[in-house]
Amino acid sequence: MSNIYHQRRSELLEQLPNNSLVIVAGYQQKVRSKNIKYHFRQDNDFLYLTGFDEPDAIAILVEGDVNQYLLFCRPKDPAQEVSFGARAGIEGAVAIHGADKGYTVAEFEQTLALLLQQINTLYISDELGRFSSQLISWVNHQRHHCSFDTPKRFTSIKPLAEVLHSKRVVKSRDELAKIRSAVYASTAGHKAVMQACKPGINERELSSLFDFTIAKHGCNDVAYPSIVAGGNNACCLHYEENCCELVNGQMLLIDAGGEFEHYAADITRSYPVNGLFSAEQKAIYQLVLKALDQAIEKVCPGTAWNSLYETCMQVMAEGLKELGLLTGSIEQIMANESYKRFTVHKTGHWLGMDVHDVGPYHDNEGKWRTLEANMVFTIEPGIYIPLDALDVPQAYRGMGIRIEDDILVTHNGYENLSVDVPRSIEEIEAFMAK
């Protein structure tokens, strides 16, 4: 596996100008309460380039005639390791994780000061601002401490994301395998919840069932807090309380995805709590599914990213007009964007190590980015009609319907990775009746 990270570091340094240095700050462990800490989760840029999954670590990459990878980490400590688990130490940084040199974290600033004497450009990845207050003093150190007649080094500072995040959008074979595993586990989780769903069950029970099921399929955690939202709760886009009892006649929206070896799935399904759609639920659901399917059919290399959103909005606007929930001509509706009252959000995002994965949606000229093979993203149209929408017929109120699939761009089209989670009305009703 270390070869993958070595290749990524080498490809990154090839893109940088001469005499560049990269600092990648790992995450530190956070306190949950007093001496109890949250389960540690490493920064994804750090993981992508190093594969090193311990707290407090820092990586330095140096571009030069001979590229260097330096890894700063916690030293071996038998007493701490008995209580909190094994550490790689500086020996493991080299022998296991492929660093050219290993150092303790305490040696970082002194080592960096020596390296910066020959550096023109410093690239920084520090998502939580661990070193934000020290950057200027670091790059000014040489010219502030050298003799008056020594050439001064004026080092510029740039965000590493500018270079790295665009690269992360296109996935390797190894990354795709991990995303497939996350989707496979999440598919099992969604099916388990769909079959367990019934009036009287609590949202938290279904959330826990999803967690249990993905664990059986190799996931250590969810990729994001699960949204298990009955009835009007689904009109809150990031509802996380998952604490209400489901009521007969409601719709349930579940947006949940597992994380497999640091790669995410992100799937949403909406269905009636009792397993049978009412006429109004069926009308809204079929409209959202039509928008999703028409957007998916547009996916292929060369398609502009924004066209997927535009397709969804056009389909849903036309359908909402036909149902009498929007008034005016379709030209007026699209021009004044009155459909946004019910559609609310955008309809997709990149998917990878982050559930809302990094990477630009525009090219260097500001135009919408076009799709390429091995990109992975979600498409997730939704329609939301809250209880307080008093000008809407009552049978539609208190309903949020979103359907979300995980889509891989292939060389000649697409693959819907999450298609095995029941999605048509007929499939859902039959599956829930089992």
Image (tube, grey):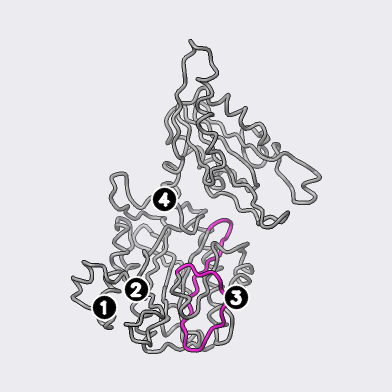
Circle 4 sits on which residue?
359
Circle 3 sits on which residue?
204
Query: Mark 4 and mark 3: span between their CA atoms?
Result: 33 Å
> Which of pointers 2 and 3 lies earlier in the amino acid sequence?
3
Q: Residue at x 30, y 55 (%)?
A: 302
395 or 413, which is in the foreground?
395
Snapshot quadrant of residue 113: top right
The correct choice, above or below, for 53 with respect to 6 in the image is: below
Labelled disc at residue 342? 2
Query: Mark 2 and mark 3: span between their CA atoms?
Result: 27 Å
- Residue range (magenta): 237-263
Classify mark 1: helix, strand or loop: loop
Query: Mark 1 and mark 2: span between their CA atoms?
Result: 9 Å
Cβ–Cβ under 8 Å for marks 4 and 2: no
Q: Position of residue 160 (x, y in %)?
A: 46, 40
Structural crowding at the residue carrying mark 3, measured as other residues with C-alpha within 10 Å and reported as few (<14), some (14–19) or many (≥20): some
Q: Position of residue 131 (x, y in %)?
A: 55, 38
Which amino acid is tagged 4?
A: Gly
Q: Is residue 251 left or right of residue 315?
A: right
Circle 1 sits on which residue?
326
